[in-house]
Image (cartoon, grey):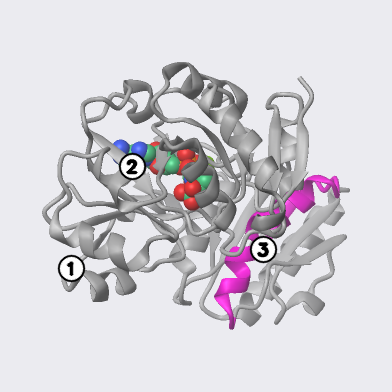
Amino acid sequence: METKLVKIEQMKDCLDEMKEAARLIREGEVVAFPTETVYGLGGNGLMESAVKKIYAAKGRPSDNPLILHVCDMEMAQSLVKEIPKPAKRAMEHFWPGPLTVILPRADHIPDCVTGGLSTVAIRMPAHPAALELIRQAQLPIAAPSANTSGRPSPTKAEHVFEDLHGKIPMILDGGAVKVGVESTIVDFTEPIPVILRPGRITKEELETVIGGEVQMNTSFKGIENGVPKAPGMKYKHYAPKARMVLVLGEDTTLVVEKINALVKSAHEDGKKVGVIATDETIHKYHADEVLSVGKRQKMETVIANLYDVLRQFDHKNVDIIYSEGFEGEPLSDAVMNRLVKAAGHEVIRI
Ligand code: TXA
Ligand code: MG
């Protein structure tokens, strides 16, 4: 299959392309499109055969449920049994935006979308192209991140092309995304809402808007003092091709020293070594390939660059990557959730 790469800059200049993408979706095909978080791989969320195509293109296990993307509140309402007050407040405040809500599902949603659960994940994305696509298709679009399962999520159309060309008919190219990590997922079916996946919207922001407590599902970090809490969770995800090791510590100077010592001993073993640094530390490393993930003092830049940096290392053919970690900074939950998985839970704490 040939994959058509369509540039969309101003929405008003590409209405024909948007119509074609919406037609493909209505006919049961899958199309990659930009959202503000990461690129999505979209298909008709109410058509079983379309949902199966999504799983097949990504190579994703079909028991891992998908998010339904909507363009207005009415569409969201049609997909659920009820919307509890805290959920309503959060949706009204953060939508369109990087928030996914888990709610009791309506009966007509196919089991293949929800993985057979009694709940469904719903999000209204903020990207104009995403909203226009849903509006034109006139149906909820099921969309996981548009990467091959296990690879870093795509933040540019090139990333989607790298993973999925030849497997899908169309990629809408809206340039680099704004946020850079996937939406914050909040389960509103619990008496106290639970964050299942941290993202750009933080626990504190949610609590302010809801006017009540929100819990963090702490198992996501999966480490305590450098040791995996649940060894069964040692799967890789968002992973670059090279082995990756995360170095955590309160004192950045000590972290830099430790990483340089690790680089030295890897060099002695004849390895080519990469380092994931920050703007503040990039000049301090003696490795073969050093990339900055952004400014530690400005964590939005770190979440925006994270996946791109992981993918860049795949083209640099390093044998091992050492990365700085983040703790205590704003948004460090969102960053560490991805970094720890990218490192396959290999963490050194100093
Ligand atoms: O920002 C995002 O959320 C992006 C863009 C494309 O919208 N989408 C995304 O989808 O990250 P995906 O499929 O890569 O991640 C969806 C996550 C999965 O971890 C899945 O297990 C979880 O949402 N999920 C979906 N339905 C769920 C449910 N009913 N209960 C709990 N978790 C659910
Ligand atoms: Mg994903």
Camera-nearest label, 1 or 2: 2
Q: Is residue 175 left or right of residue 337?
A: right
**Please, what is the three-letter code of the amino acid marked with disc 2?**
Ala
Q: State the quadrant of the N terminus.
A: top right
Extreme residue toward the top, this view: 49
Whether 204 is among the magenta residues is no
Q: Up-down: is 172 above or below 109? A: below
Mark 1 vs mark 2, CA separation in Å: 21 Å
Identify which residue is drawn at 72% across, 45% down: 159
Q: Residues within 10 Å of mark 2 (few under 14, many from 20)?
A: many
Identify which residue is drawn at 44% across, 76% down: 328
Q: Image quarter for residue 264? A: bottom right
Return the residue at label 3: 305
Return the residue at label 2: 121
**Please, what is the three-letter code of the amino acid marked with disc 1?**
Glu
Mark 2 vs mark 3, CA separation in Å: 26 Å
Observer able to see residue 240? no
Ligand 1 closer than 8 Å to the CB at disc 1? no
Of callouts 1 and 3, the N-terminal one: 1
Q: Image quarter for residue 56? A: top right
Q: Position of residue 32 (x, y in %)?
A: 63, 38
Residues rendered magenta in the picture: 297-322
Q: Residues within 10 Å of mark 1 (few under 14, many from 20)?
A: few
Q: Do residues under tags 2 and 3 come within 8 Å of each other at their CB atoms?
A: no
Q: Up-down: is 42 above or below 289? A: above
Q: Position of residue 146 (x, y in %)?
A: 60, 39
Dot label at residue 94 = none
Ligand 1 closer than 8 Å to the CB at disc 2? yes
Observer able to see residue 66? yes
Return the residue at label 1: 213
Q: Do residues under tags 1 and 3 come within 8 Å of each other at their CB atoms?
A: no
Magenta region's main secondary structure?
helix
